[in-house]
Amino acid sequence: MKIEKILLKLATTFFIFLLLWGVFYWQSQEEKGKLVVNFFDVGQGDAILIKTPNNQKILIDGGPDNGVLAKLGRSLPFYDKEIDLVILSHPHTDHLIGLIEVLKRYKVKKILGTGVMHTTPEYLVWLEEINGQKIPLEIAIRGQSFDFGGETKLEILYPLENLAGQSVDDLNNTSIVSKLTFKNNSFLFVGDAEFPIEEKLIASDADLKANVLKIGHHGSKNATSENFLEKVDPQNAVISVGANNKFGHPSGRVTNRLKREGVEILRTDEMGDIKFLGDGNNFVKAY
């Protein structure tokens, strides 16, 4: 009986292994040579996983808890524990918490942040983990560009100046704004940026035009102005937001504005995870 149980256990384990391998093989074939952008449903927060055509991984924010770990586990092969670049858009907990555990579970090659002063316990733990592992930390500033090969690059559009060590009243408006392009596919990620950053970006003459816009501050009424929307001119707008959240996000003003401009609205509270696959010209969307 003992031998039979052992054999059954081994057979079950082998079957599960084959099933997992098959799932990830199919996924890798579907994504091969494409730009993949996953907007994870992490509740009231942000977490975005990017896989480049050359299979580099970029994680922008980590959500309000450790739920991002399960999302990464379903999006990456179980043996793949490396992330090339982690970006913390700003140190609010709904963007930060999940990243702390990511640093402990994955080999992170580089971190991009603003370096603003913030003294919450969670942020201090984040900094201690970076220092303890000696992970290279780069301060975001406009003009930086990360080249991932194959005509794929990530450009930093904001902050306009080095914010390292600065004390600020509104962390939302220190958010890193970045633009990802792969040939003719483009995404604009704005963190929790609100009207003041939008105005600065317009005045800076940055190239804001993008196919997909990650809506600022979860669809707050204080973000996504008409002028900014005209400059970006997106076909799709992703709102990362928690169901029935206490803030009333997204604002009806924002969703109505998007509808008037003919922009397709995709919400994580309604659709769950939202995935884009780009071949450099066209997109396929999956929910």
Image: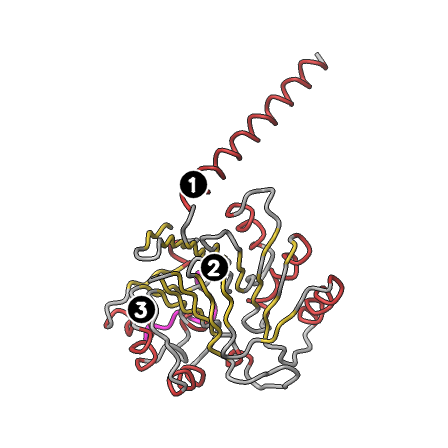
Observer-side mark, 3 or 2, equals 2
Whichever of callouts 1 and 2 sits on the residue coming sooner in the sequence is 1
Q: How is the image coloured?
A: secondary structure
Location of residue 75 in the rendering, given as x and y in whole percent from the top left corner: 50, 48
Q: Is residue 19 left or right of residue 115?
A: left
Instruction: Confirm whether the magenta stretch covers residue 267.
Output: no
Q: Which residues are magenta?
A: 243-253
Label 2 neighbour load within 10 Å: few <14, some 14-19, many 20+: few
Task: Identify the residue under disc 2.
Answer: 149
Disc 1 is placed on an element classified as helix
Name the amino acid type tagged 1.
Gln
Label 3 neighbour load within 10 Å: few <14, some 14-19, many 20+: many
Label 1 neighbour load within 10 Å: few <14, some 14-19, many 20+: few
Task: Identify the residue under disc 1.
Answer: 29
Residue drawn where x is 32% and y is 55% of the image: 283
Q: Give the total of numbered labels.
A: 3
Q: Nearer the viewer, residue 264 or 233?
A: 233
Disc 3 is placed on an element classified as loop
User: In the rendered view of the protein, which quadrant contains the N terminus?
Assistant: top right
